[in-house]
Amino acid sequence: MFKKLFFTILFFIAANISIYPQTNSITKEILDAALANFDSLVSIRRDLHQYPELAGNEINTSKKIRDYLTKLGLEVKPEIGGHGIVAILKGNKPGQTIAWRADIDAFKDDSPDNVSFASKISGVRHICGHDIHTTIGLGIAKVLSSLKDEISGTIVFIFQPAEETFSGAYKMIDDGIFNEIKPEAIFGLHVTPLPTGTISVKENEMYPASKEISITLNGKNNLDSAADECITILQSFNIVKDEKKFFDISTLGDPQLGVISPNSIYANYVVVTNARKEESENGIVVKARVLASTEENHTTVINQLEEKLNSAQWKDCVKAISVVQKHENVFNDPKLTAAAVNIIKNGFGERVLIPLYGMNPFNNDDFAVFQKQIPGVYFFIGASDFAKGMIAMPHTPNFVADENCIEKGVSYFSFLLQQYSSTK
């Protein structure tokens, strides 16, 4: 579904990536371990893919994760925030505590699953790649548990349920996930249509935040007219470059306008959707969802809204304005991101990293909720092989992930955690 030019450019990128690290004994150990475990990890991924479970119902998925981690000798804490799992790996050297998070739930989808290990659960698929995320997390735990002498401090593995409903992270926090042990940094990833072997990341916002604005109107005259004007005011806050292309999901991969372009139309925006008026016992309530690339944009919208309402002829009809956070934004701590990028460059070379400039407005991730508690970095990992027709675009009917991304993910991020654990 992406433009042919995008395929051509990314295919060129993939063909020119050197996946071999600079000479480093620990990097070689990690690469060898990732490769040695690859076949078994693929088997795990395919089993998870065949038996997907929806958010809040990850019973068997959770058991499989728990059993695997227990066999590794990790300290395992089950049923956190529902069917979440926390596993603790203690290194043989003193150091800080850091965390790796993977989401585990699947999604409702009736489209054909065009792989030999297709879902056996009717209407449910791993169409967002959480089976890959889970497998990479297990692979990292496997590799690092065999290298305890090289681990400083403690690594906490978080296998989170209910990401698709944006509730699992909240539930794990409410259930006390960080009461006994609170990491100093947290890392995670998501598969993307980028070529297998690549990673993309940037400082600050990775996904936008969304808020719902409600304006309560009450009075004797012209409430409908005032409500219509409220909707017009809200819609005036849209900041979108080239609206037609912006809302075409294929533009995300456009080499000139998409998220990997310095001129990305997804770098700075405000999108107001579903502006409407509803009757209530208190009069009329005007509501809208506001999606903004930065918190500053949200603040500007709210301030300008208040100014316009206060200057309206019907300002006395405005009884209340409320702003409710719907989804937090995934926000990468700048200092931590820079440190992580340098570690990956040192281990695997600069060419595995694709610069990222824009933010996908069509998705989000409740990894953001953990980042409100702990500084964190969220990566995009390439999982597409265009020559084989494998395009890992989440939540699209033809989603297919190249399983070679499992080995790459285990290698890159085992190295990151091992190296970062010893930075203090």
Image: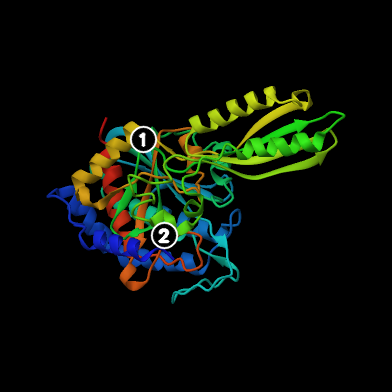
Closer to the eye: label 1 or 2: 2
Residue 92 visible, this orientation: no
Q: Quadrant of the N terminus?
A: bottom left
Q: Which mark is residue 97?
A: 1
Q: Is residue 398 left or right of residue 253?
A: right
Task: Kindly state the secondary structure of the residue where label 1 is placed.
Answer: strand
Residue at left offset 38%, top offset 56%: 254
Q: Residue furthest bottom?
A: 116
Image height check: is 412 above or below 211? below
Q: Quadrant of the C terminus?
A: top left
Q: Is residue 219 left or right of residue 241?
A: right
Residue 42 visible, this orientation: yes
Residue at left offset 14%, top offset 48%: 24
Q: If you read the primary sequence from the N terminus, does the residue marked by circle 1 or circle 2 appear first?
A: 1
- The residues tagged by marks 1 and 2 sit, at their Cα atoms, a distance apart of 25 Å
Name the residue nearer the viewer: 314 or 32.
Answer: 314
Q: Position of residue 46 (x, y in %)?
A: 43, 68
Q: Is residue 32 left or right of residue 321?
A: left
Q: Position of residue 61 (x, y in %)?
A: 51, 59
Amino acid type, mark 1: Thr
Name the residue nearer the viewer: 90 or 55.
Answer: 55
Coloring scheme of the render? Answer: rainbow
Residue at left offset 58%, top offset 59%: 54
Residue at left offset 32%, top offset 55%: 409
Amino acid type, mark 2: Ile
Q: Is residue 4 left or right of residue 298?
A: left
Residue behind mark 2:
132
Image height check: is 87 above or below 44? above
Q: How many discs mark residues in the rendered view?
A: 2
Q: Position of residue 337 (x, y in %)?
A: 33, 37
Q: Residue furthest left?
A: 23
